[in-house]
Image (cartoon, grey):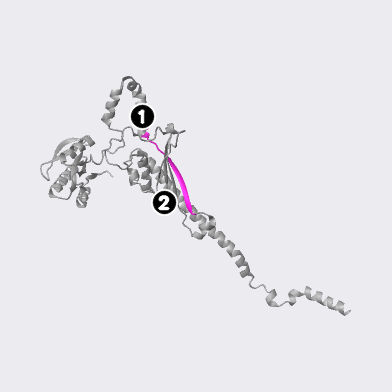
């Protein structure tokens, strides 16, 4: 009986344990802290993941934008390797030659389709000055891409001419700028992007179509090998009709003037003046009534040049000329070229265009 009573008492104590236990065991205070300590790491990891994923997307989009812009600008300036890849500007007379499309643009590379690689490519993270001057026109044009990508980015530029389609492809890569611990966790150390742009020349296409439509039969019937050789000699050698750096260096004003007259299809002329002197000698006046003046070597703001400048400014104000261009050529003896900063500002303030004929 005593044992049974003791057993019942134990059962009663167990059933009433929540009411009889000590307060620090049964109290619910602090439960929020425990729950927060369990949930907060999960929320933190999710937030950090979203942040780093946003960083990755931003860097990838920036890299793709650089690749897309580089490919587009390289394709845009493909018709002339002397064009500035950013602005598209080039000096008058700087061209790649009459037949570069067929002889220097990889037009016949498709014949090597089964014998080798017909893709032309250059690395954009290596020194390119020597490569730019190695005589390969395609490589020279592809190396323009290096001026279009930000520093710290490496990659490769490719050109493919399949006759039916020509396109430039740019592949870039850059380090993934996040803490090294995160790089180790996710396994990403760099970001890569690729973009391609088609090379199109609407003007050239129209010229070729007109040539084939109107002159092809006549050419085939009448042109012989001697006529072809004569035309070839007239328009220059395979390296292009662009003047070399040596040919743009002159020792006398007469040589520079003769070259300028051929360049702009102009002739020597004169115009009367009223404010300074009585007349102005124009080295080359083109068909658009634009005056071109030739200068060799380095020129400072001397009295003689200021008088010439004032004459040109007067002719412009009085609408006797539609424009004035001062051309500066390199002096062959010492290599000097161009106006001084003071003279350049004076010319620009009076609406006179400055052209410096110096090949890089």
- Sequence-wise, the earlier of marks 1 and 2 is 2
Quadrant where the C terminus sits is top left
**Foreground residue among 277 and 31:** 31
Query: In the rendering, at what x and y percent does residue 307 appear?
Result: 13, 47
Question: Which residue is pictured at 37% across the width and 39% down the height?
Answer: 138
Image point (64%, 70%), residue name = 31
Considering the image in quadrants, where does the N terminus appear? bottom right
Numbered disc 2: secondary structure: loop
Q: How many other residues sit within 10 Å of disc 2, few (<14), some (14-19) or many (≥20)? A: some
Does 269 appear in magenta? no
- x, y percent for residue 203: 35, 33
Q: Quadrant of residue 253?
A: top left
Q: Label 1: which residue?
A: 208
**Residue shown at 87% from the left, 80% from the top:** 2
Label 1 vs label 2, nearer the camera = 2
- Residue 96 screen position, x and y as percent: 31, 37
**Quarter occupied by residue 252:** top left
Which residue reaches farthest bottom?
A: 2
Please identify the residue farthest to the top as the structure is shown.
221
Q: Is residue 247 left or right of residue 77?
A: left
- Name the side, left or right, on which 300 lies relative to 148: left
**In the displayed structure, would residue 34 be above or below residue 354?**
below
Question: Going 14% across and 38% down the picture, which residue do you hit?
Answer: 270
Distance between the alpha carbons at the discs numbered 1 and 2: 39 Å
Q: Tell me: 33 left or right of 244.
A: right
* Numbered range of the magenta stretch: 189-208
Mark 1–mark 2 contact, CB under 8 Å? no
The residue beneath circle 2 is 153
């Amino acid at each position: 009986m005593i044992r049974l009573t003791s057993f019942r008492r134990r059962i009663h104590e167990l059933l009433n344990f929540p009411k009889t236990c000590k307060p620090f065991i049964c109290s619910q205070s602090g439960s929020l802290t425990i729950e927060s300590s369990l949930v907060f790491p999960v929320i933190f990891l999710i937030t950090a993941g979203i942040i780093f994923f946003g960083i990755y997307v931003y860097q990838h989009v920036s890299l793709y934008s650089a690749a897309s812009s580089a490919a587009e600008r390289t394709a845009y300036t493909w018709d002339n390797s002397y064009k500035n890849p950013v602005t598209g500007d080039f000096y008058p007379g700087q061209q790649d030659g009459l037949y570069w499309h067929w002889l220097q643009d990889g037009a016949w590379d498709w014949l090597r389709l089964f014998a080798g690689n017909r893709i032309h490519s250059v690395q954009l993270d290596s020194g390119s000055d020597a490569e730019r001057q190695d005589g390969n026109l395609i490589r020279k044009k592809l190396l323009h891409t290096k001026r279009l990508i930000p520093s710290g980015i490496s990659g490769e530029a490719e050109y493919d001419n399949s006759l039916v389609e020509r396109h430039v492809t740019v592949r870039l890569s850059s380090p993934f700028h996040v803490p090294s611990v995160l790089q180790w966790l996710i396994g990403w150390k760099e970001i890569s992007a690729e973009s391609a742009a088609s090379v199109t020349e609407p003007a050239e296409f129209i010229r070729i179509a007109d040539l084939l439509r109107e002159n092809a039969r006549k050419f085939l019937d009448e042109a012989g090998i001697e006529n072809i050789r004569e035309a070839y000699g007239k328009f220059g050698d395979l390296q292009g009709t662009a003047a070399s750096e040596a040919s743009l260096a002159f020792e006398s004003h007469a040589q520079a003037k003769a070259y300028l007259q051929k360049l702009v299809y102009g002739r020597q002329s004169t115009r009367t003046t009223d404010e300074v002197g009585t007349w102005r000698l124009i080295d080359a006046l083109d068909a658009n009534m634009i005056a071109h003046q030739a200068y060799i070597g380095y020129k400072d703001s001397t009295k003689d040049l200021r008088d010439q400048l004032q004459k040109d400014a007067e002719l412009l104000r009085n609408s006797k000329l539609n424009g004035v261009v001062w051309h500066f050529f390199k002096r062959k003896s010492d290599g000097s070229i161009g106006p001084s900063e003071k003279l350049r500002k004076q010319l620009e303030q009076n609406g006179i265009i400055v052209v410096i004929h110096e090949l890089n």
